[in-house]
Image: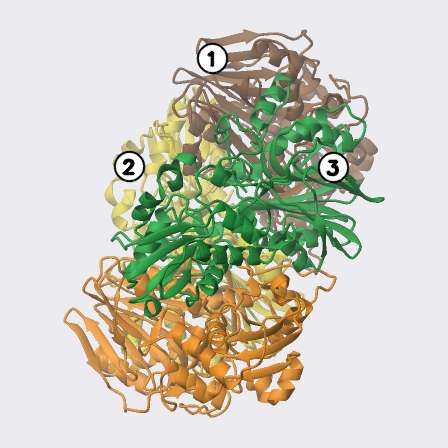
Chain colours: A brown, B yellow, C orange, D green
């Protein structure tokens, strides 16, 4: 029903997909600040499964608890109790393991000349390496590889007299796609980059302001959705209420369209659009664009389910759950020495032979990345007896890497970057293959083309990336045991 | 798509459901015996999530590895390596925690006069307490509360000269519903109780025999399904091949019908019937029996999905995923002090408001146990804006406890045991409520009534249970730290 | 000051020594029964460092907590709370790792026809393998390799009507050296084998009876020492007080003399003799028997300290701590690839060069087992500049294995079994070597020869051991993960 | 024989003593750099038991492994393997728990404009808080509360062109007592503060230079002691060999005299003096200064042992181990509800009644801090039957706090700060009490008074401390779970 979990794909190298990005949650002036943040992260677990953290403040001290793993494992009741105070921010993240991972685990908290401060963000600061080099020249030292550490150095070196100015000044030097939460002793700030590439929503709970990446976090804690934070907007929440600032030069909004296709939970609402409905409508568009005669429409669970339903409805072909997902896919498993065909995919998905045998099947998936998984699924479904397999994809071909917070492979590894449609079809072994068109996708979402970032499909990057930024290598390799 | 995991429901007291039962897997004469058993358990994880174990033998010594938790967490590569030999059996189980749990964790291995022996079973030996009392009078001592320990004492005290006779003699004293795997130095035995209440299937892999509770285990390891082990059959596998014995008096078969409704994975085949199709057809029957005018059919995921699809198809009403399941539901979570309505259910399911608001909704679930969860789901869906809610259940009312391996509450706690249909409807707050009829259920499964155990619905117990067997209390309370 | 800990020697294969044996503690009718037992085990930690356990009873149920490791790590406050009731027994033990170890970890608790029962013992039942074979023929099954499991089977099969008779009857079939604690619902029994090979002392605390292996346990909990339990005595403690029974045929007492030399804590009192003083006096006797001109007397810590002091005093030679012990020797350490001379010994002991250089040194140690450690110590002390090294041992040569609870190597591995004195001296590289005589040892202890077991030195086994009992191998290899 | 371990005293609030300080080890250009560092830390475990870390470099990248706990627990073989390269530094430390502790756990590694750098130190930078405030004003941000972070900021902001100059310039701004190891890609630096308050020794192993806090580390790895690093000296080791620099203004040396009394291992050599002998001689001096008629001299183990031996020898009174130490004192223990007299001390020490009863006893201990432990020991020894108790202390009265790396209580809590000798005697309940004189102590050490820091006894602080520096409070409270 929603994204195949990162947890599932990490150790299954057969199963390539996008890595999820991050999720944030913040609350100001609520007696259960940390507990609500915990639940807000819990509801956004699909946005990052490898580390999580919460920082709270009682208006004087800052309390941090962070760890590697899932939210429910990292935080025990006793941990929540140590997170004192009425203001809190939290973060879930895709990350690496070890202390090195823990070091990069957000939110970060620091002391500087004006007191304590904590930060976390979802997305990517494109010019962080250049800024870091400049800062090091000025005598700054770095302990993590996180972009956030660059930002906090900029804030700490600012001569401006108010925190708002220091923060706005520092952020104005950044380029990229990011949504940011900043917690000071008596202030919570939420901020989206000028293009609004990553999401950030504002809500209200018992009279207190809350911020989250997705509205599904509001649903769990019982908060009411108020509005999206606007691209380039900085909302400053303190005891006097909420102040909305637009300190940056205005540019065209470029919200990430892939949030509709894959990232967001289907029960979330983005820019006023229900994600489930958008996905369902993409399936409808796909059926209109690339109909084919068949006996069954079968989704690749979970994000393929709504478009497959829309496709089936529009095409008048029965929809069936022909691929059963194993919910217990763990981090590690042991591969037998003897080869089991399509083993990596089989651990997660099992075709329901009874349904499939002898049938002409339309498979609906959300995207094709390297193509290896698609090939294995097609092979597995054919081995289950399908007489024809027609692959339909609920996004345009993924031809380019993302530099704004989504962990995609190098463009050179993307199947659609290297092959034309017919070659792709042959490579994955399907009888036919079709992707939804840009037009179909935007029609389904109900938004005109041009107001979203679709660089991974189109190559139109809203923020220039001078050269392909390689993964930032640190000289420091750090592990710990406790 | 298949049963809400035990893992999910254990700490969520709001969310009442049946506890899953057990699963077994065995392989004889394969160089990767332990590894295949590991995968066979992995594929059957839905049948028991709290402990697992494997015993292997190299024809002389027995190697055991067991633990509390999920299969993927209990077994590391190094553990599998310690499980030497070409013969192996394994078990997944619903169990309690601590050493007490570990003690009861199967398979058990023992030494007795004829060497080593290991056993595991799925199900329940109804007369175990009486047999235990008799054995204690004869000087037997007990270290666990497992039924298996009773059986092994019977085997050890047998004067018969062959293992087959010792085992058949011991089993003939047992009543209940159980499928059993026994591993001796050079022999693997699979056995179903005379009524065949619990499943056991036979397959072949690379020329070696394999046994499992469900065919989905065969799919993962690439084994071919051969046939179901018959009720009362004992298959003895050794270097001479497979021998089929029927050492017990013949009785009417009584396979558990609830495996179709809830337990088995939808991609498994039971008695030649595909589980997914059976569930889908139950939905069709349900629509015929209790049609109602509505805008949407919405399943309670996951086991409500196939019947909801069948219902929607038959009724000509759109099917939509209106309840989104959080896949990251962990063992523990922290409840906020401030009340969040329907919090326990909300952690797992979130209604998709965009779809539901203003709609007349048919909710399809697999069963109603205590009724508390159903009430909360109805309340939550109504709060999401549904104008009418019609609850449809893909099994007859659950009025009786199971004594053959399914952990149901006392009959007195079952909502259908205490209330008539209209009272139930009111209690859960639905606008209408209907259960599938016995006739509809059996028609959907494609089997005549009378050949299955449906005691939980009908009270017709195939094996007499003199009085309600209470949970067997041990005098011994054991914990450990390692 | 007391025995080099097992913890230290286990992973240091360079450092050969006796493995410690076990310790027990029991208390009847005290509101803090489990807590006192915990402390009693804590004070006897030197008798066994690899597993520990406590069983308590409230007169109805039995509560067990056991684990691998040190007492302070195994028991947390919350664990002690679960050990309900006013009666309790506990055990520390040398044992193997894994669940296999946990299985053999005492006390054991069982249910049998007469209710619950728990047992633990210090020592060895010599005829356990034969009894086990007989029991298996009669249909008994075994899950551990512990001698205690044999005893409990004998008790369970007894037809006698009282627990006292059942226990006495079962014990009368056993041969060996063992002190036993048995806990029933309303009764605590302490029992020593007929020869009284292993120690067991009786004390009183706040009006409640307590039992322990050594008096140092009484010191910590503040109990008063009353007397030693006599060889062959069975003390039965219940609500009517203490009853002393002598159900077994009387034989000559044979208390283990090695408890004086090495095992017991120096602050304990055995048979009315202070252990520290006995050791000191052995040093005095040794000086009289084998004086040598030298500059310094240096102990091999810790059990060499009192005899070295006695030797120095008698010989009029200065006593100095010339070998410094590292208190932090852990379970594991990492050996460098490049060879460091005498590395294994060096991790534990470092010679104090400043003291030793150019000096004629008398080294006093408690025993020589395989001789490898002695050789390394001599080499290390010589490398530190000693001009002469005279080795003096505070026990006679160890020529035979122990079959009554002390884990000694096979006789064939004992240096004194294979070599004469001069060969030993050469092998360890000392300038002279002498052991205390039997006469000197018994004079120091203040007891006539003939009333103690000194089989490890003399080969006079009080209980016949038909053939060297090899370590009992089980067919079952069991591990677990929790 | 050497300091009562920190491990022992931490959870035993009854047992007050100084907290140990830190230890360092470094090696340059050795193929087993990390392994040797591990062993060097292992041998110096007595200097810090709560965290440890190693940083190595291969001339390009830096590899760090750190953790809370004992060296042998923190580093596994696989961890050592990850610490690549031929240069390495390591650190053991007294520290707090949690990630907060881990954050402060040394060595620290950073990236700055000139590459990577790692540092660790033993001691305290007195003006760190002022420097930190200045740095924050200039835009520095802080993540730990460690003094080292101040130093690295100073280094990073230096405009000097060579690392030697940057480091010397930065250190010249520091006041306090500290020995420092700095590791750059191709260089190892060892440095002592101008007064040489904390120790640092230089050795050679297989042609490679090694640095350590104490010579006992050299003994274990087989390195030869070369010389002490001089006060104010900076030794720079690179591929060209060792360069000795004296970049700071020369002042009077002030090595910590308490290293002789308590901190250092007795088998170490400081300033050419064997620690064991110094302690023994202090006992001799003490006997001359404050002789008393008695039957026995008994040490409070372990650091009381050598002075007690010296006292006994000089006074001609028998020396006996009248207090037996429990080697298994763990981190936690459970106190019984019923009061056991002197429980906290009893867990560690048990008087040997047989020796003590009816005797006039001289107890020798190393120091009196708050006085609570001394009072309990006296009480316990008296309860064991001593007829007179004369307490002799092998250091002058401790009247002042240390600000150079030893964690002492506030002066106000020190017994000798509040009371005169007679009041102290009464308070601890001894029949007489005497401390060694300054003259006696220095005579024993063999050094003239005036060249050591004895501020804890005399109040003469070599480095001015403007006001009592309170424990540095951070706004940040950080925990983590992995």
Quickly name the residue at label 3.
A475
Residue C236 in the figure: left or right of residue D130: left
Residues at circles 3 and 2 in contact by the CB criterion of under 8 Å:
no
Q: Residues within 10 Å of mark 2 (few under 14, many from 20)?
A: some
State the SS at label 3. Answer: loop
Q: Is residue C146 visible?
A: no
Residues at circles 1 and 2 in contact by the CB criterion of under 8 Å:
no
Q: From the image, which quarter does the N terminus of chain A lie in? A: top right
Nearest the viewer among B291 and D216 is D216
Figure quadrant of residue A315: top right
State the SS at label 1. Answer: strand
Q: Position of residue C401 (x, y in %)?
A: 51, 84
Task: State the CA–CA distance, disc 1 to disc 3.
Answer: 40 Å
Q: Earlier in the sequence, mark 1 or mark 3?
A: 1
The numbered mark at residue A238 is 1
Q: Position of residue C261 (x, y in %)?
A: 45, 77
Q: Residues within 10 Å of mark 1 (few under 14, many from 20)?
A: some
Q: Position of residue C155 (x, y in %)?
A: 30, 79
Q: Residue at x 39, y 69 (%)?
A: C106
Figure quadrant of residue A279: top right
Please determine whether, in this image, residue C464 is positioned above or below residue D313: below
Chain assignment, label 1: A
Outermost residue, right side: D240
Nearest the viewer among B156 and B76 is B76
State the SS at label 2. Answer: helix
Chain assignment, label 3: A
Please determine whether, in this image, residue D220 is positioned above or below residue D429: below
The numbered mark at residue B424 is 2
């Amino acid at each position: 029903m929603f994204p195949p979990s990162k947890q599932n794909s990490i150790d299954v190298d057969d199963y390539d997909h996008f890595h999820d990005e991050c999720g944030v949650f913040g609350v100001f002036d609520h007696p259960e600040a940390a507990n609500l943040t915990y639940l807000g992260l819990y509801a956004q677990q699909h946005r990052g499964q490898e580390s999580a953290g919460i920082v709270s403040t009682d208006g004087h001290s800052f309390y941090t608890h962070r760890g590697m793993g899932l939210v429910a494992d990292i935080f025990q009741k006793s941990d929540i109790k140590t997170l004192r105070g009425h203001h809190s921010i939290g973060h879930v993240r895709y990350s690496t393991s070890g202390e090195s991972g823990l070091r990069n685990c957000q939110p970060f908290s620091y002391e500087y000349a004006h007191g304590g401060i904590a930060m976390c963000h979802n997305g990517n600061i494109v010019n962080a390496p250049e800024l870091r080099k400049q800062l090091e020249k000025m005598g700054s030292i770095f302990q993590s590889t996180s972009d956030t550490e660059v930002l906090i150095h900029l804030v700490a070196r600012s001569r401006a007299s108010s925190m708002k100015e220091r923060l706005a000044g520092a952020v104005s030097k950044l380029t990229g796609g990011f949504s940011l939460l900043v917690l000071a002793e008596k202030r919570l700030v939420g901020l989206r980059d000028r293009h609004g590439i990553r999401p950030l929503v504002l809500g209200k709970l018992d009279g207190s302001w809350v911020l989250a990446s997705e509205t599904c976090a509001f649903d769990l804690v019982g908060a009411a959705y108020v509005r999206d934070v606007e691209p380039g907007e900085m909302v400053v929440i303190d005891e006097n209420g909420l102040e909305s600032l637009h300190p940056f030069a205005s540019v065209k909004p470029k919200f990430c369209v892939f949030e509709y296709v894959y990232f967001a939970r289907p029960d979330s609402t983005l820019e006023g659009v229900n994600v489930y409905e958008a996905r369902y409508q993409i399936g409808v568009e796909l059926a209109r664009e690339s109909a084919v005669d068949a006996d069954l429409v079968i989704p690749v669970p979970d994000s393929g389910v709504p478009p497959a339903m829309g496709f089936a409805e529009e095409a008048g072909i029965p929809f069936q759950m022909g691929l059963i997902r194993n919910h217990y896919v763990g981090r590690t498993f042991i591969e037998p020495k003897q080869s089991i065909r399509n083993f990596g995919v089989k651990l997660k998905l099992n075709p329901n032979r009874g349904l499939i045998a002898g049938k002409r099947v339309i498979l609906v998936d959300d995207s094709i990345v390297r193509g290896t998984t698609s090939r294995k699924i097609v092979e597995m479904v054919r081995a289950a007896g399908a007489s024809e397999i027609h692959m339909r994809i609920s996004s345009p071909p993924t031809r380019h890497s993302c530099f704004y917070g989504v962990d995609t492979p190098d463009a050179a590894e993307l199947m659609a970057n290297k092959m034309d449609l017919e070659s792709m079809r042959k490579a994955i072994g399907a009888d036919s293959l079709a992707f939804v068109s840009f037009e179909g996708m935007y029609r389904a979402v109900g938004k005109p083309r041009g107001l979203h970032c679709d660089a991974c499909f189109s190559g139109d990057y809203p923020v220039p990336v001078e050269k392909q930024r390689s993964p930032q290598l640190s000289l420091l390799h750090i592990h710990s045991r406790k």
